Image: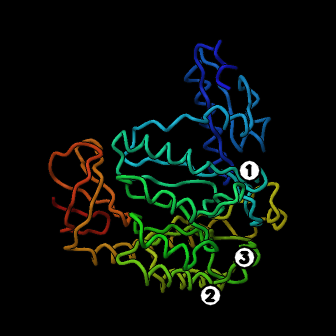
Amino acid sequence: MLKNFSDIENLVIVNTCCVTKEAEIKSLRKFRQSLKRYPNSKVIATGCACRVYPEKFSAAYQVIDNVQRNSIIKGIFPDPGKARFFLKIEDGCNEKCTYCIVSKVRNKIESKTIDNIKEEIYWAISLGYKEIVLVGANIGLYGIDLGLHLIDLLQALKGIPDLPRIRLSSVEPKFIDAELIQCLKDYPVCRHFHIPIQSADDNILSRMRRGYDAAHLKRSLDLISRNFDDIAIGGDVIVGFPGEGEEEFLNTYKFIESNPFTHLHVFPYSPRPGTEAYDLGDPVLREEKKRRLWELKNLIAEKNYQFRKNLLGKTFNIIVETNADIISGLTDNYIRVEVNGDYDKNTLIKIKINEVSKNKTYGSI
């Protein structure tokens, strides 16, 4: 595919997103910045926002769809500029959530073969990576186009010599079951789950068409907590979905409060044209969404603080990252720890957590 642009001396590709209004705005801003910053280059736009709003990217040299984009990047491994290697194992989602545009613009599941994933892992190992993050639009759907399951992939990777620790990016609640947990228990897996619960009110979950209720969420969380010590559990929550009154919000708030969540991504509901929920309007006032958002943020900040305090005196491995004069790294259970000393970037070191503040965690070698 790159041969099609071989006659272009300077080429800029802007990948766009439209999963939320904010993502759409950022994508358009980045596209316009690229036009100004690289006036002598050909700027190509691709990604989901281009598919939904092609007119907004009409100034591009060319707009290419996701299929063309994937053919461009096929076989190109990520730039080794980060401490963690992000390995995309699948793309696409065909779930029918009423608020989500992804299944409208990327509804075809495309999974990498196990052999291709292994090849990428061997490459990451050769570069010295100590952690690999498995990512995708919905990694729980990995392999359905190949007659495989996520567990098949995990089992196949176990035999790789010197396999780095593996982190799962985000797993939908419906894919968290005893079989997956049992597989992960015998694995160099990071003790960290990120679960897009979106709500914990049964009425809102039904309106979102999420396919589970609060009782299912509770069972999934209990299953995780029983099988892993010091486990970090994050989540995604949408506030202000149509129909979410104070009672529905409080059901979600109390669920978060009473369960072992350690971090959250909280989003105000953003109507997406083309989704089923778009016809419901946007009845919850912006100010009310903001209030609910900050109530959950303040709640999770306190829960995260208490979680980190419980880790005082314990030892963990971190992968060294540098930012100016600050040396830090992530534990396997997703705590960023700052340390004193001079360590090479991407080095795996063992530290003891010896100080915790409201906003930071400190450790020593």
Q: Position of residue 15 (x, y in %)?
A: 63, 38
Residue 180 location, quadrant = bottom right
Residue 121 spot, x, y in % from top left = 46, 46
Q: Residue at x 44, y 81 (%)?
A: 225
State the quadrant of the C terminus: bottom left
Q: Which residue is mark 1?
A: 106
The mark that comes first in sequence, 3 or 1, is: 1
Q: Amino acid at mark 2?
A: Ala
Q: Quadrant of residue 336?
A: bottom left
Above or below 172: residue 36: above
| Image position of 251 (left or right of 101) | left
Q: Residue at x 82, y 55 (%)?
A: 274
Badge 3 is on which residue? 211
Question: From the viewer's perspective, is 130 left or right of 137?
Answer: left
Left or right: residue 308 versus residue 362 is: right
Identify the element where label 2 is drawn: helix
Inter-mark Cα distance, 3 to 1: 20 Å
User: In the structure shown, which secondary structural element does the residue marked by tag 1 occupy?
Assistant: loop
Q: Disc 2 designates what residue?
A: 215
Whole-number angstrom distance, CA of label 1 to CA of label 2: 30 Å
SS at circle 3: loop
